[in-house]
Amino acid sequence: MLRPQLLRQATRALSSKAPRSSFRATQPAVSTVRNFSRTPYRFDKEPSRGGIDAATTAGEPGESGDHEGQYARTDKSVRVEYPGEEDLPSSRPVQGRGGFHFKRTLASFSLEDRVGVITGGARGLGLVMSQALVASGADVAIVDLNKEEAQRSAIGLVETFKEENPGADKLPKVTAHFADVSSPTSVNQAVTEILKEHGKIDNLVTSAGFTENYDAISYPHDRMQKLWGVNVDGTYLFAVAVAKHLMERQSAGSIVFIGSMSGAIVNVPQPQAPYNAAKAAVRHLAASLAVEWAHAGIRVNCISPGYMLTALTKEILDDNPDLQKKWTSLIPQGKMGRPEDLMGAVTFLASDASGYVTGADLRVDGGYTIT
Ligand SMILES: NC(=O)c1ccc[n+]([C@@H]2O[C@H](COP(=O)([O-])OP(=O)(O)OC[C@H]3O[C@@H](n4cnc5c(N)ncnc54)[C@H](O)[C@@H]3O)[C@@H](O)[C@H]2O)c1
């Protein structure tokens, strides 16, 4: 269960009137004494004459109406905790996205003879991106905290491939591996196991990660450390382990980090400051490692998805239709994405089609971050 009381609280908060601002002008820069008076000091402030003036900095907060800042503020009553492993819903491979076809396309998009590793590949976006690599010709190693779920997903991927490619003479090899990506020991063990099974790694996609909604003042420190541990340390540790292997093998490779549009903008209304900062770190880690490893032919890019409808987000939104309306009203395309909307992006960045692309951030967000 995704804490239904929290979700109800969120719904109430969203359907209520927009909160009036508690913002007050800052202290003048020349002040040497901190003034904690509740009456704000307004620097050179002309009194508002009403009308359009009330909508400028001459007006008092809320003077021109309750709508001030309505679509640009977080609401601390929106709180969603990432569920425990036992409460995470399963995902299924998508149908009708693979199989033989007779449309001409560039050969450079093919991943034939490549081995791809996807962290967090048992579910959600990671599972469908694994499917994209399989459909494009790669063998795949799924890495997840939940090995049983990863095994079910690995079997599901091969079954879907068989359905969509009847008579295929070669089946993809898809394996499942345990790792807690935030632990260096666990990451190194998983990489050793993958190399034993597949012999090599050419591509890495880091999809293990999660978000939680808490206002910053209330976020428990241990939960924040876990969030950063999985999203940031986990991305870094796996990238380093795979890059080390590629350098030892003296082979080129492509690494794709899954960031988020939250690494570039601040989502509203749900508060999630540590997640936003973590995804900004992931994006800049991609750019930094791209520079550091370019000499070895290793490309590192980031995909920053917008709001995507996975089994998990569906559970949240089913209980919370107001949140769905709020989100889609802020997306120029007017729709949330589906996991399959990442299939082309990940294949492009993993393949030779993107040979001269490194350190880039590819936003797949329906235009959210450009408005
Ligand atoms: N769903 C969205 O709308 C959305 C939008 C932008 C970015 N993202 C990012 O995409 C990635 C995938 O998200 P999702 O929606 O598919 O989530 P999800 O919860 O459906 O899947 C995440 C997977 O990661 C695994 N995982 C969690 N902690 C782990 C750990 N310590 N070690 C190994 N595996 C671990 C989980 O078991 C799960 O299978 C995340 O990094 C997320 O932040 C998601």
Image: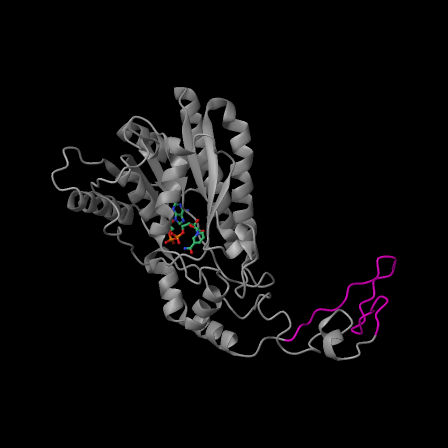
Regarding residue 196, the answer to whether it shows in the image is yes
Residue at x 38% of width, y 41% of height: 346
Q: Which residues are magenta?
A: 20-46
Q: Position of residue 121 (x, y in %)?
A: 34, 45
| Main secondary structure of the magenta stretch | loop
Q: How is the image coloured?
A: one colour
Tell me the quarter of the picture where residue 161 sits. Answer: top left
Q: Position of residue 180 (x, y in %)?
A: 40, 43
Tell me the quarter of the picture where residue 185 sits. Answer: top left
Asked if the stretch drawn in magenta spans residue 355, the answer is: no
Residue placed furthest toward the front? 104
Q: Quadrant of the N terminus?
A: bottom left
As drawn, 353 above or below 267: above
As drawn, 290 above or below 38: above
Which of the two residues, 98 or 159, is positioned nearer the viewer here?
Answer: 98
Q: Position of residue 149 (x, y in %)?
A: 28, 49
Which of the two residues, 291 or 47, is positioned nearer the viewer here?
Answer: 47
Tell me: 305 left or right of 56. Answer: left
